[in-house]
Image (cartoon, rainbow, N blue to C red):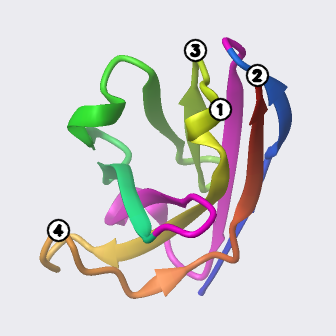
Amino acid sequence: VRLVESGGGLVQAGGSLRLSCAVSGLRVNHYRVGWFRQAPGKGREFVGHISRTTNTWYAESMKGRVAISGDNDENTVYLRMSRLRPEDTGVYSCAAAGTDRATHEYDYWGQGTQVTVSS
């Protein structure tokens, strides 16, 4: 199983970004795929997840600014972020788990993509 994130980069505050999580070795419409981020010097933070490319759940702090979607044909999950703030800077990673796993448990992880928001 392999998860590869892309789409990170430098963006100005107030801007938008779409991150991709390309998955191989499992079908995203059969799994839960989550997005996480880790700011410099801080622990990993849950952003949201999508289950079977249908049901989404977002961290309270992220609601209204993020949207997760999935493409079954591309076997890819996307994280769309808007109204970005400097405090959104960090490494964003995706992870996958069987839908029978507890919501905080993930079996497979990507390497992450850096997002930097300038003020």
Query: What secondary structure is marked by label 1?
Result: helix
Nearest to viewer (mark 3 / mark 2):
2
Q: Report if the CB atoms under discs 3 and 1 are less than 8 Å apart.
A: no
Mark 4 nearby-residue class (10 Å; few <14, some 14–19, many ≥20): few
Query: In the rendered view, does 47 fall on the left or right side of 88?
Result: left
Query: In the rendered view, does 86 fall on the left or right side of 77?
Result: right
| Cα distance between the residues tagged 3 and 2 | 12 Å
Q: Report if the CB atoms under discs 1 and 4 are less than 8 Å apart.
A: no
The residue depicted at 35 percent of the width and 17 percent of the height is 64
In depth, the one of 42 and 104 nearer the eye is 42
Nearest to viewer (mark 1 / mark 4):
1
Image location (x, y in percent) of residue 18: 69, 32
Query: What secondary structure is marked by label 2?
Result: loop
**Which mark, by number, is residue 86?**
1
**Which mark, by number, is residue 83?**
3
Tell me if I can see residue 60 in this picture. Answer: yes
Query: In the rendered view, does 88 fall on the left or right side of 114?
Result: left
Above/below status of 60 relative to 43: above
| Cα distance between the residues tagged 3 and 4 | 27 Å
Name the residue type under label 3. Answer: Arg
In depth, the one of 82 and 103 nearer the eye is 82
Nearest to viewer (mark 3 / mark 4):
3
Residue behind mark 4: 103
Name the residue type under label 4. Answer: Thr
Residue behind mark 2: 119
Q: Magenta residues? A: 14-42
Residue 94, picture quadrant: bottom right
- Whichever of labels 2 and 4 marks the residue nearer the N terminus, that label is 4
| Cα distance between the residues tagged 2 and 1 | 6 Å
- Whichever of labels 2 and 1 marks the residue nearer the N terminus, that label is 1
- Whichever of labels 3 and 2 marks the residue nearer the N terminus, that label is 3
Image location (x, y in percent) of residue 87: 57, 38
